[in-house]
Image (spheres, rainbow, N blue to C red):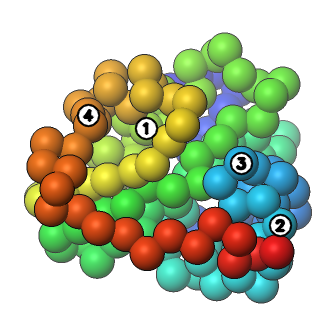
Amino acid sequence: MISGYRVSSNQLDMDLTVIYNYISNSYWAGNIPINTMKKAMHNSLCFGVFTDSGQQVAFARMVTDSATFAYLADVFVVEDHRGKGISKWLMKTILEDKNLQGIRRMVLATSDAHGLYEQFGFKALSCPNIFMELHQPDVYK
């Protein structure tokens, strides 16, 4: 817990404007259409961090079947709220969520936050030769 903030996984609490403005300008989903973002959120387990006044300052979502597999996506903390431990608190909250217990495999992709995720047990793929992808990086252009 961090004084002055709260975490919620209630979809109704999520601020689409804040989330969309960040994600649509990110390196991983730049130019994502807003309706695609809405659909992604609707079909995911979403987590947000909010100030006591209700301003959303962080977000993450798990794409999961809530039984065997989960993919962590779209994690961010807005710049003005970084350096306060929010990302660690958010990750701890996500991994303790009742819907994510007993999951056999959780994966994520990052180009710049390996240190954060390693603190929570994530590591490079142990068998990268068994994973394949269909990657379409220009799909939103």
Q: Disc 3 versus disc 4: distance between alpha carbons?
A: 21 Å
Residue at the image point whose x is 83% and y is 45% from the top: 55
**Residue 64 position in % (x across, y down):** 34, 71
Residue identified by numbered label 1: 91
Whichever of callouts 1 and 2 sits on the residue coming sooner in the sequence is 2
For the residue labelled by badge 2, is the local secondary structure a helix, a strand or a loop? loop
- Bin the neighbour count of mark 4 within 10 Å (Cα to Cα): few under 14, some 14-19, many 20 and up: few
Tag 4, which secondary structure? loop
**Residue 126 position in % (x across, y down):** 14, 42
Using a 10 Å C-alpha cutoff, classify the residue at mark 1 as few (fewer than 14 neighbours), some (14 to 19) or many (20 or more): some
Separation of residues labelled 1 and 2 (CA atoms): 26 Å
* 126 relative to 140 in the view: left or right: left
Q: In the rendered structure, which amino acid carries the disc numbered 2? A: Asn
Front in this rendered view, residue 105 or 91: 105
Check disc 3 and report the residue beneath it: 27
Identify the mark at residue 31; answer none if there is no mark: 2
Three-letter amino acid code at disc 3? Answer: Tyr
The quadrant of the image that shows the C terminus is bottom right
Three-letter amino acid code at the position of disc 4: Lys
Q: Where residue 14 sits in the image (x, y, percent)?
A: 71, 63
Q: Is residue 120 left or right of residue 35?
A: left
Please, what secondary structure does the residue beneath circle 3 have? loop
- Residue in the picture at 32% in, 26% down: 118
Q: How far apart are labels 4 and 1 at the CA level? A: 15 Å
Quick one: 66 or 73, which is closer to the camera? 73
Asked if labels 1 and 3 touch by Cβ distance under 8 angstroms, the answer is no
From the image, tell me which residue sits under label 4.
123
Question: In front here: 52 or 116?
Answer: 116
Left or right of 86 on screen, residue 69: left
How would you rate the neighbour count of disc 2 (Cα within 10 Å): few for under 14, some for 14-19, many for 20 or more?
some
Say few, some or many: other residues with alpha carbon within 10 Å of mark 3 (under 14 / 14 to 19 / 20 or more).
few
